[in-house]
């Protein structure tokens, strides 16, 4: 049966939606998710070409996007990420070109009979993960266009994420924070253990972003047990002399092959320079050499980095008065956003928080308040994210003054002061829709 574009997208979520009434909000990934339903299909679609799995708590999407942008200078590169902002097709791209509606619908139509055979018992809370079907869509899309290298961003976790069914040769583990505690565990060690499960015997190399001592220890042990070489930020590669500039950032990047001086990147924030170093180290390993072996290569690389567009990662969406948007859900990443505001000369701003209950809303609020900014609590309309009275009660307990708004749009209504919107990636669609209506 040939599905239309909307029917194809609905099908991806259909199994999950049938099981949803039988799922508990507090269930861990180990009890809720079942990647075994998609394992055989995903492995049958895998062509054996170079694949990279990307995980972490902060910056995994940015690192994956930067890596795709660099690799696509020399090889056709596929990228699967999530979530999307406005268009579901954003999750699947080749050399930064999104999948087209007709091809998306055609691929899902062809895959539907395979997934229909699984028949999980929805009444017991069993379902085929949307991410599993999306992974199959990505593999089919990339195969149709003969990509050379494919990059797959994991969701919140790895151990029970269907993306792990892709036999990746390389892995990237960006910085790990305390997040998704409801699904992944209540400690850094538990979360790092989940993320580090991306490392498996037979991989060619794993690259780690900057890590806490606890996360680093677990990552190193996982790599050692799997017998996989591990390259670490700060030891094997790093960003140096990081500076803010008018249109983004500038830094030097040291890899184990060379020092790249004064690289500009159109993304804002010190963390994006670290993401750049991580992506460049991985790209060198995948390509087998320097990314700029002559003047022409270097010109193309520098030009590409200054034309990156990755919305919602410290994006300046208005200049007067300034308005910044960032996917920030914990106190660590809040530090990057607040530093960016300082560098832009903004000492007092309205900080709108759209951070669900199970993330570090309190840590972000405290840091924003301590930095002298005004805190506005808000929510998003996505029903999969929980916003309850827990948030205002906790801020009152901590002594953080705040204003409450029913939604991000309400919080932005009539915004005439410098503003930063910090929250889960799912809020970005609401920001985009608000922008389309005029800001």
Image (cartoon, rainbow, N blue to C red):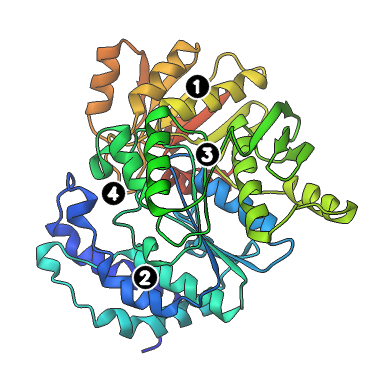
Q: Which residue occupies 41% across, 85% down?
A: 110
Q: Quadrant of the N terminus?
A: bottom left
Q: In screen coordinates, is 82 left or right of 25?
A: right
Q: Are marks 3 and 2 in contact (CB under 8 Å)?
A: no
Extreme residue in the bottom direction: 1
Q: Which residue occupies 46% across, 45% down?
A: 430
From the image, state whether disc 1 or disc 2 is nearer to you: 2
Q: CA distance from mark 4 to mark 2?
A: 21 Å
Which tag, 4 or 3, sits closer to the chain's start? 3
The total number of labels drawn is 4
Helix, strand, or loop for circle 2? Answer: helix
Which tag, 1 or 3, sits closer to the chain's start? 3
Name above or below for residue 366 compared with residue 406: above
Q: Which residue is mark 4?
A: 383
Image coordinates for residue 423, horizontal then vertical, percent: 43, 36
Q: Are marks 1 and 2 in contact (CB under 8 Å)?
A: no
Q: Which residue is mark 1?
A: 350
Badge 1 density bin: few <14, some 14–19, many ≥20, Cα 10 Å: many
Badge 4 density bin: few <14, some 14–19, many ≥20, Cα 10 Å: few
Q: CA distance from mark 1 to mark 3?
A: 31 Å
Which tag, 1 or 2, sits closer to the chain's start? 2
Q: Which residue is mark 3?
A: 209
Q: In screen coordinates, is 295 left or right of 336?
A: right
Q: Quadrant of the C terminus?
A: top right
Q: Which residue is mark 2?
A: 133
Q: Which residue occupies 53% across, 79% down?
A: 103
Q: CA distance from mark 3 to mark 2?
A: 29 Å
From the viewer's side, name the closer residue of 430 and 166: 166
């Amino acid at each position: 049966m040939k599905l239309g574009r909307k029917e194809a997208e609905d099908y991806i979520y259909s199994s999950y939606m049938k099981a949803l009434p039988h799922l508990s909000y507090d269930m861990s990934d180990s009890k809720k998710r079942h990647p075994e339903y998609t394992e055989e299909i995903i492995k049958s679609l895998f062509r054996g070409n170079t694949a990279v799995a990307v995980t972490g708590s902060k910056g995994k999407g940015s690192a994956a996007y930067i890596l795709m942008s660099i690799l696509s200078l020399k090889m056709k590169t596929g990228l699967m990420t999530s979530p999307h902002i406005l268009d579901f097709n954003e999750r699947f791209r080749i050399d930064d070109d999104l999948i087209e509606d007709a091809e998306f619908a055609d691929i899902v139509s062809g895959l539907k009979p395979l997934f229909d055979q699984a028949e999980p018992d929805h009444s017991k809370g069993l379902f085929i993960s949307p991410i599993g079907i999306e992974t199959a869509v990505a593999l089919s899309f990339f195969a149709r266009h003969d990509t050379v290298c494919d990059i797959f961003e994991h969701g919140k976790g790895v151990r029970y994420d269907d993306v792990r069914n892709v036999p990746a040769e390389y892995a990237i583990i960006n910085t790990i924070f305390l997040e998704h505690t409801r699904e992944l565990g209540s400690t850094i060690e538990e979360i790092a253990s989940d993320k580090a499960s991306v490392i498996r015997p037979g991989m060619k190399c794993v690259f780690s972003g900057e890590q806490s001592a606890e996360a680093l220890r677990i990552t190193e042990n996982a790599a050692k047990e799997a017998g996989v070489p591990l390259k670490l930020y700060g030891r094997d590669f790093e960003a140096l002399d990081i500076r803010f500039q008018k249109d983004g950032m500038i830094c030097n990047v040291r890899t184990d092959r060379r020092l790249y001086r004064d690289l500009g990147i159109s993304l804002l924030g010190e963390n994006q320079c670290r993401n750049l170093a991580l992506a460049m180290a991985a790209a060198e390993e995948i390509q087998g050499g320097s990314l700029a072996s002559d003047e022409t290569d270097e010109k193309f690389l520098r030009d590409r980095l200054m034309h990156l567009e990755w919305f919602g990662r410290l994006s300046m969406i208005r200049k007067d008065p300034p308005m910044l948007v960032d996917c920030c859900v914990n106190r660590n990443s809040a530090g990057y956003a607040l530093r960016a505001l300082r560098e832009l000369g903004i000492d007092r701003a309205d900080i709108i928080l759209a951070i669900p209950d199970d993330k570090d809303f309190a840590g972000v609020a405290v840091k924003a308040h301590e930095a002298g900014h005004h805190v506005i609590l808000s929510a998003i309309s996505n029903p999969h994210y929980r916003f309850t009275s827990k948030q205002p009660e906790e801020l009152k307990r901590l002594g953080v003054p705040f204003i409450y708004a029913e939604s991000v749009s309400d919080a932005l209504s009539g915004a005439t002061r410098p503003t930063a919107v910090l929250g889960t990636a799912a809020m970005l669609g609401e920001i985009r829709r608000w922008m389309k209506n005029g800001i």
